[in-house]
Amino acid sequence: MTEPAPPYSKFNILYELYYGFRPNKPTFLPQDYPDLTDKTAIVTGSNTGIGLQVMKLLYSKNCNVLSVVRTKSKGDAARDETIAEFPTSKGSITVIGGCDYLDLTTVKPAGSKIKDIIGDKPLNLIIHNAGLMASVNTATSKQGYEAMFQVNVMGSQLLQHFLDPIFLKKDDDLKRIVWVSSGAHLLGFKEYGINWEDPVFENCSVKERPSASTLYGQSKAANIMQAKAWASKNKEKVEEVGCVSVSCYPGNLRTDLQRDWNGWLRSVVGRSLFWDSIYGAYSELYAAMSPKLTTKDQGAYVVPFGGLRDPREDVKVGLTNGSDLKLWDWVNDKIKEFF
Ligand SMILES: NC(=O)c1ccc[n+]([C@@H]2O[C@H](COP(=O)([O-])OP(=O)(O)OC[C@H]3O[C@@H](n4cnc5c(N)ncnc54)[C@H](OP(=O)(O)O)[C@@H]3O)[C@@H](O)[C@H]2O)c1
């Protein structure tokens, strides 16, 4: 067990939630992005929402994008839309379908395809964007785990396991990983955001689970920890290669993430308070490419629409007292049978 988490201020939580709806203006825009000819980026969940906007912006800068999705036909449609929108791009889009984090057996085949496609070329950016925000607390994965933890945390960590050997090479100056988190991490459990006894709720009935927002919050607190833990776990290689691993809260955006909300909530709250999904892409691409972030920023928490802030006080402490590593190891133990 890690040391008990320090308390956090409820006032700060309210302020940070408010900040999410009224964040700073974008600080790093497409005109600031470098040309990405001969660079390769992996974007998960790029068939829709923020991921699609990220793919479009990268492709518009001549990047080769590997679009990792669960439904190939949706990925193909998003690729066609992107290519039609940027006909002069010299980049490419390759869709890797069938990677469904609700079933961990589908991740290894995706990892193998990526390895074959990349070959000896540099892999520059990995954006773990795919995510699930269920409106109910009952969703359970094929492996019998709470669905949001499996999709948002275990799925990304498992894919990263297959990407490590191809990513951790000193082959280019631009080497970043972005673990997409959320301001919703503020709503996670009291101890560093995590229900340490049983993060996947496999030892209790569905009726005993907490609310869907607490479960989503837990998974997004875990994403913040993953960014730091990955860098610490691979410290030597990370220093040699010069890569940077950060988490990112993209903002409160109108996307399919709110697909379960009823019509009233979606139209009134969504339209008045949430931002267009392109703003989420500005945040994620700040995390992926801003020259302001360096190897000193391992595990930093990028906030909308470009910039750094502290996560919840206890989660911040968890990045320095080994809680992040403990979570990483716990997840690794669970996913290693799928390596
Ligand atoms: N929108 C917001 O306000 C907001 C705020 C904070 C953080 N975020 C985070 O931003 C990221 C992108 O969200 P978004 O708003 O763009 O949502 P979205 O429009 O719902 O897109 C989510 C993406 O994740 C994919 N995905 C969902 N379940 C999956 C699974 N089981 N296996 C593999 N892929 C799966 C979806 O694929 P399908 O289309 O096939 O379902 C889709 O491509 C997420 O990590 C989310 O938590 C969003």
Image (cartoon, rainbow, N blue to C red):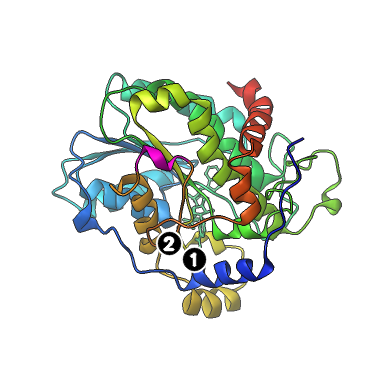
Judged from the image, the secondary structure of the residue bearing numbered disc 1 is loop
Ligand 1 is within 8 Å of the C-beta of the residue at disc 1? yes
Q: Image quarter for residue 178? A: top left
Give the camera-side residue of 8 and 61: 8
Give the answer, above or below, for where 166 lies relative to 156. Answer: above
Q: Which residue is mark 2?
A: 304
Q: Give SS at disc 2.
A: loop
Residue at the image point whose x is 31% and y is 62% from the top: 27
From the image, state whether disc 1 or disc 2 is nearer to you.
Answer: 2
The picture quadrant where one finds residue 8 is: bottom right
Q: Would residue 43 be visible to someone looking at this image?
A: no
Nearest the viewer among 102 and 63 is: 63
Prevailing secondary structure of the magenta residues: helix
- When the figure is inspected, residue 93 is found, relative to residue 239, above or below; the finding is below
Badge 1 is on which residue? 252
Q: Position of residue 25 (x, y in %)?
A: 35, 69
Q: Residue at x 20, y 33 (%)?
A: 38
Question: Which amino acid, mark 2?
Answer: Pro
Number of marks drawn? 2
> Which numbered tag is attached to residue 122?
none
Residue 25 part of the magenta-drawn span:
no
Mark 1 or mark 2: which comes first in sequence? 1
In the rendered image of this protein, does residue 30 appear above or below residue 165? below
Quarter of the picture containing the N terminus is: top right
